[in-house]
Image (cartoon, grey):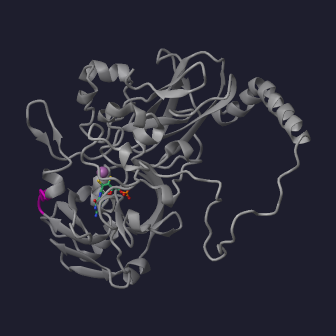
Amino acid sequence: MSPKHSGRRRFLKEGSAALAGLAVESVRSASGQTLGSEKSEAPFKETRAYGERSRFENSARWPLKPEHITPATNPQVVYAPSMTPLQDLIGIITPSGLHYQVGPILSTPKPDLDPRQHRLLIHGLVDRPLILTMEELKRLPSVSRIHFLECGANSSPAYRNNLEFHNTAQQQHGHTSCSEWTGVPLSLLLQEAGVQKGASWVVSEGAEPARRNKSMPLEKAMDDVIVAYGQNGEAVRPEQGYPVRLVVPGWVGVYNTKWLRRIKLVDQPYMVRDDSVKYTTLLPDGKSRWFRFEHGPKSVITYPSGGHRLPGPGFYEIRGLAWSGGGYVKRVEISFDGGRSWKDAPIQDPVHRFAHSRFRLPWTWNGEEVVIQSRCTDERGESQPTIAEVRKLCGDDPDKWQLSEVGSFNGVQPWRINRDGSVDNAMFS
Ligand SMILES: Nc1nc2c(c(=O)[nH]1)N[C@H]1C(S)=C(S)[C@@H](COP(=O)(O)O)O[C@H]1N2
Ligand SMILES: [Mo]
């Protein structure tokens, strides 16, 4: 029996009682009420040209208010709604309006680039420097791929200082999102420009006033990087780098330069500001690690997760997202006993490389306190460390939980379901 079907069959066996309960419940309440009226009470709004979600849907990026950020959580963060509500996502695509955001938009107005004026310059160690208009870029052969983005600071254990505001999947892990990106392979543009022999690194630069930039090795640039103008079937959103950005699959967010205006081929890492002053890891011996590349394997149960409240014992479908900078997610396991035993959770087909992948497992809650957690293994065979393993490696002080030679913190996320059905972040307790 394939894992895909075992879930459904198991539900039919274990869950029929629960569902029967639901059916009786709904018949009973329907008998006392009229069916929903088809007359709309909403004020009229013209949405025939471009639609919007139902007024009853209100999932939003977080933090919503400045008081959700305290110096204890992160003194660097300037207030702006930023993190994706992972617990509200359905499937594997993050709606563009809920994609997490990092950059100048958090403190200043977002760049407002006119695609007719915008140019992309490719120069440095190339035979034929190029200046491309957006129109020229869009005439070139293109690809569409589903990829996650994730900030290197995502899931930082330092967030524990304010658990009141770091109890949910969004608050603990919301600096990751997943879109279908469309654009031109960077390798094609570089071949067009003619890479010279001595070139080994690529510097990319954004068009915001600060001209944020970042270098990456030429090898990655020639592999699978996309110069993307499309996101989820339409133009890249202004917050995500309109009219064009880099998408660097599997690598830490900072490489994915938004509002892309310049690509320069050079013969060494350029030690631009974001290579050197920022985005470095201080090691115990006082030296800094300057370059971090791909994320490790990672997963989060999104239902039930911190902040949810289960109405009572009975059937639930455990749902979550798994992804890895190592490529495909190969396996997701779930533990219901504090990590002593693990059960495979089927992963939804098709699984995309460097993309959020959806796992689901039917489960019956007996009403007792329980800790649930998921563990991802990727195509390299790498697995997430459990918090017990993290403690063994890094000690008991979460400030020192620097797993990240590369990528963001990827320790296993435990959620505690309390007897009253409330769910809490159990990463630190
Ligand atoms: N031009 C520009 N590109 C940028 C940044 C920026 O500040 N300016 N931030 C980087 C960082 S740190 C991250 S995590 C990702 C976030 O992409 P997103 O805002 O589309 O989620 O963009 C990267 N690209
Ligand atoms: Mo980032």
The residue at the point 55 percent across, 21 percent down is 418
**Is 312 placed left or right of 287 in the picture?**
right
The residue at the point 73 percent across, 29 percent down is 11
The residue at the point 39 percent across, 24 percent down is 386
Image spot of residue 33 (x, y percent): 87, 44
| Residue furthest right as drawn | 31
**Is 13 placed left or right of 99 in the picture?**
right
The quadrant of the picture occupied by the C terminus is: top left
**Is 168 placed left or right of 137 in the picture?**
right
Number of callouts = 0
Name above or below for residue 68 compared with residue 78.
Answer: above
Name above or below for residue 349 compared with residue 138.
Answer: above
Name above or below for residue 339 compared with residue 200.
Answer: above
The quadrant of the picture occupied by the N terminus is: top right
For this rendering, which residue is in front, 367 or 15? Answer: 367
Q: Main secondary structure of the magenta part?
A: loop
| Residue furthest left as drawn | 286
Image spot of residue 213 (x, y percent): 21, 62
**Image quadrant of ligand 1?**
bottom left
For this rendering, which residue is in front, 57 or 348? Answer: 57
Name above or below for residue 408 compared with residue 269.
Answer: above
Q: Is residue 120 visible?
A: yes
The boundaries of the magenta stretch are 267-272
Image spot of residue 53 (x, y percent): 62, 61
For this rendering, which residue is in front, 43 or 202? Answer: 43
Q: Is residue 323 visible?
A: no
Is residue 83 covered in magenta?
no
The residue at the point 28 percent across, 42 percent down is 74
Image spot of residue 175 (x, y percent): 39, 47
